[in-house]
Image (spheres, rainbow, N blue to C red):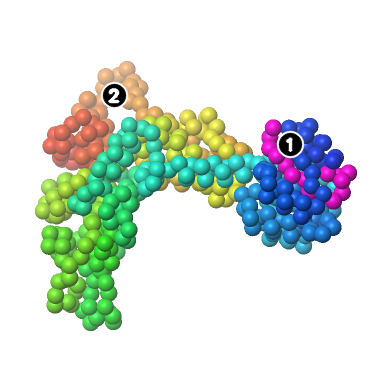
Amino acid sequence: MKGRVLVVDDDAGMTALLCERLGRRDFHAEASPAAEAALERLARDDFDVVVTDVQMRGLGGIALCERITASRPDLPVLVITAFGSLDTAVAAIRAGAFDFLAKPFEVEELVFRLDRALQHRRLSEEVKRLRALEPGPLGELLGESEAMRKLRDLVARVARSDAPVLVTGETGAGKELVARAIHQQGAHADGPFVALNCAAVPDPLLESELFGHEKGAFTDARSAHTGLLLSAGGGTLFLDEIAELPLALQPKLLRALQERRVRPLGASAEIPFDARIVAASNRDLEAAVEEGRFREDLFFRLDVLHVEVPPLRARGSDVLLLAQHFLREYAARSGRPVLGLSRGAAEKLLAYAWPGNVRELGNAIERAVALTRHEQILVEDLPERIREHGPSHVLVASEDPSELLPLELIEERYIARVLAAVGGNKTLAARVLGLDRKTLYRKIERIEKRGG
């Protein structure tokens, strides 16, 4: 059985005919002779779709639709009328009708629209079910891979402490989700979660944004401003892209973190603050320290607890789990009956390297849901870079020894490729290459000297 349908019409002959024909097409259809009787029936029984005529004695179909959508917004209503004017159609849609069908119509057309309504309802129910299953704050950290199990376990343990946390990982891997999970699992969960992207605020304003200022502290300071360290009191301050914090500002942040006190610009006294600090970076902070772009003492102060977010390519079939999660979310949001991934699309998603990580996957699925003309996302619905992606190979295309490359040059090119793939993160590149960091640095210096 496809689903239970309640047919509402005061024309007994019409309801009997529709119920009989829908029954032949695997629907369980029941008749109700009036809108009032239908409302009583819906209070007792659960139906998947309501089909109602507009013109009936007593309560009309439009009013019935309004009553149903007010009390059961999950129950789709299909309105049928012999008066297929634009005004009637608009009134039905405003009343919350899922669809509108004018008489005369073919039964196959009604079946098609009922199938769409059922798909929409089941999709909405599945989204609700998945949300209900999410285990609290860590539910946002989706994935069944070993890497994600370890991450969730580490986040739960880190959350029990009030020590500063450094979250590292590639762009789009989900560092802010991790920071929010740490906040929501910790002692400061009832306080605010305040986020600052250090790369998004101009350097001259960043100090005021962090520490605040008094009225008249500088030319444009027409009123006092509370800095984020104080605004996050009792909660968590998330400092994203901490590697972009200006070198001149780093000692002041270090002192504030050590003393747990902050002096706003232009103020004569320090003010204590109580906010947990979680910082994040997609850059190699250890390399930045060695290169003199980030203070070592501030690095050690932030890196008391360290959480590394795995890139999407290291999470195996989590790609498909996340893709299905995004698909349900975007399909429900847009009201489109997109139910899943074709086998070909799934294979393409698994084969792709995902340099933009989870954010890139979400964007790709949102695009595919918006563009597809089918119930499944096909390969043709995916962005071209994913459709055309193929595995990397080292090819020996010539038998002429003079045209073959030295092993050293092949190694240099591969190192450059790995560095590009991990966004320049030398620590992660060293791990991928199976080298210690110092060995990788020596090889990079050699490449740079050769102009590679």
Other residues around mark 2 within 10 Å, as few (<14) / some (14–19) / many (≥20) = few
Q: Residue furthest right?
A: 13
Q: Is residue 3 magenta?
A: yes
User: Horizontal and vertical percent for residue 26?
Assistant: 73, 32
- In the rendered image, the quadrant that contains the C terminus is top left
Q: Would you name the residue on which mark 1 appears?
A: 28
Instruction: Residue 386: give its label.
Output: none
In front here: 19 or 193?
Answer: 19
Q: CA distance from mark 1 to mark 2?
A: 73 Å
In front here: 273 or 326?
Answer: 273
| Quarter residue 54 falls in | bottom right
**Mark 2 residue type:** Glu
Q: With 416 as the anchor, is 292 left or right in this view?
A: left
Looking at the image, which residue is at 84% across and 41% down?
Answer: 16
The answer to whether any part of residue 229 appears in the image is: yes
User: Horizontal and vertical percent for residue 384?
Assistant: 49, 40
Q: With 112 as the anchor, is 407 left or right in this view?
A: left
Looking at the image, which residue is at 13% across and 37% down?
Answer: 438
Dots 1, 2 in contact, CB < 8 A: no
User: Horizontal and vertical percent for residue 65?
Assistant: 71, 56
User: Horizontal and vertical percent for residue 351?
Assistant: 42, 31
Above or below, 304 against 427 in this view is: below
Looking at the image, which residue is at 25% across and 32% down?
Answer: 432
**Mark 1 residue type:** His
Highlighted magenta segment, given as a residue range:
1-15
Instruction: Residue 403: give its label.
Output: 2
| Quarter residue 265 falls in | bottom left
Above or below, 113 against 35 in this view is: above
The answer to whether any part of residue 204 appears in the image is: no
Question: Which label lies toward us, 1 or 2?
Answer: 1
